[in-house]
Amino acid sequence: MKRREFLGGLGGGTALAACTPTPQPNVYLADTGSQEQFSWRMVTTWPKNFPGLGTGVNTVVKYINELSGGRLNITVYGSGELVPAFEVFDAVSLGAAEIGHSPSYYWLGKSQAAQFFTTLPFGMTAHEHNAWLYYGGGMDLWREFYEPFNLVPFPVGNTGVQMGGWFNKSINTIDDLQGLKIRMPGLAGEVLRRAGAIPVNMPNSEIFTALQTGAIDAAEWVSPYNDQAMGLQQAAQYYYYPGWQEPGPAIECIVNKEAWDSLPADLQAIIRVACQAAVVDMTSEFMARNAYALQELIDDGGVELREYPQSLLIELKRLTFEVVEELAENDPQVAKVWDSYREFMELSRGWQAISEQSYLETQEL
């Protein structure tokens, strides 16, 4: 993926997310005949108040509280405060918490199809992913696959195209990945394994120390805004792009089904609208703050920005779709969501080529 596509994917997601098919009733005028109040717990996979992602949790909670006039009060728990980061799905599914905030690709152990609702390596940008979810059938599939787990999902943000990762070793060919321990979750981790690396999945709270001490050789987290906040520039020398592994990762809000059903219609509508607003907010924030943070990392942090070799990206892309096709052959759920995702992506790429991609190329004239 070219650098100009990185910029295009982020900007487009904001505009599209604002135009969703879900009705937006005037919740202030809604008359449900009930002023019952609800107190919920939200568990997350992020440290509390962590820039961008942790504060994104606060944003959606703020919207819900304000729109409901305080009738739906949500207390936020950062990763490890109520449950460990990787137990958010189970906690909400079982009702230990009413609501959660995370990426869906952490739950591939529950369903391999879950990771498609966050992102797919070499897949759709934020712009395209939002379009698939809201207008291409993605949301229907997401709800269908989460229903057996007693969960109601909503998109609640997107960081846009991410960076490719931090390395203390120069990467010039596929052979340079051999034996490297690389923090990378989801389907991309399996792609790296087939390329000869050793994928490691760990919560973000452990990444800096593991990279600094050499417990891992490389790590991807998010993009300049979050990576700078984590101090990863102090733990690795080379900063690679593009983020082939996460071209448009969506964040999810998951609600326990019984908790959802207990709400009156106006509070359900408020959650839907607040989540949609949070998509716009997060995508816009990352677009702006990544631009500032990248410049600071280069000018003040001494970071060496490097582009992945094209030959390496070609091989990683080949391995990606090899993995996806194998999963689809062995898992009917993956096959169903992959058919939908692939069909929409192929359709979208035709339009993107003559719209945003074509326009962005004019900026380099």
Image (spheres, rainbow, N blue to C red):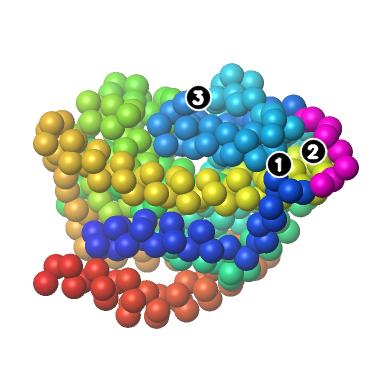
Spot occupied by residue 272 in the image (x, y as percentages of width and height): 66, 50
**Callout 1 touching callout 2 (CB < 8 Å):** yes
Q: Which mark is residue 48?
A: 3
**Callout 3 touching callout 1 (CB < 8 Å):** no
Label 2's element?
helix
Labels 3 and 1: the sequence-earlier one = 3
Mark 1 Cα within 10 Å, few/some/many (few <14, many 20+)? Answer: many
| Residue ID at (51%, 59%) | 18
Label 1's element?
strand
Horizontally, is 317 left or right of 234 in the view? right
Q: Is residue 343 visible?
A: yes
Figure quadrant of residue 167: top left
| Residue ID at (24%, 62%) | 4
Q: Nearer the viewer, residue 34 or 209?
A: 34
Spot occupied by residue 162 in the image (x, y as percentages of width and height): 35, 49
Spot occupied by residue 156 in the image (x, y as percentages of width and height): 56, 47
What segment carries the magenta color? 31-38
Pick the quarter of the image with the N terminus.
bottom left
Spot occupied by residue 59 in the image (x, y as percentages of width and height): 52, 36
Q: Which mark is residue 255?
A: 1
Labels 2 and 3: the sequence-earlier one = 3
Pick the quarter of the image with the C terminus.
bottom left
Q: What is the spatial separation of the Cα atoms under label 2 and label 3, in whole angstroms?
A: 23 Å
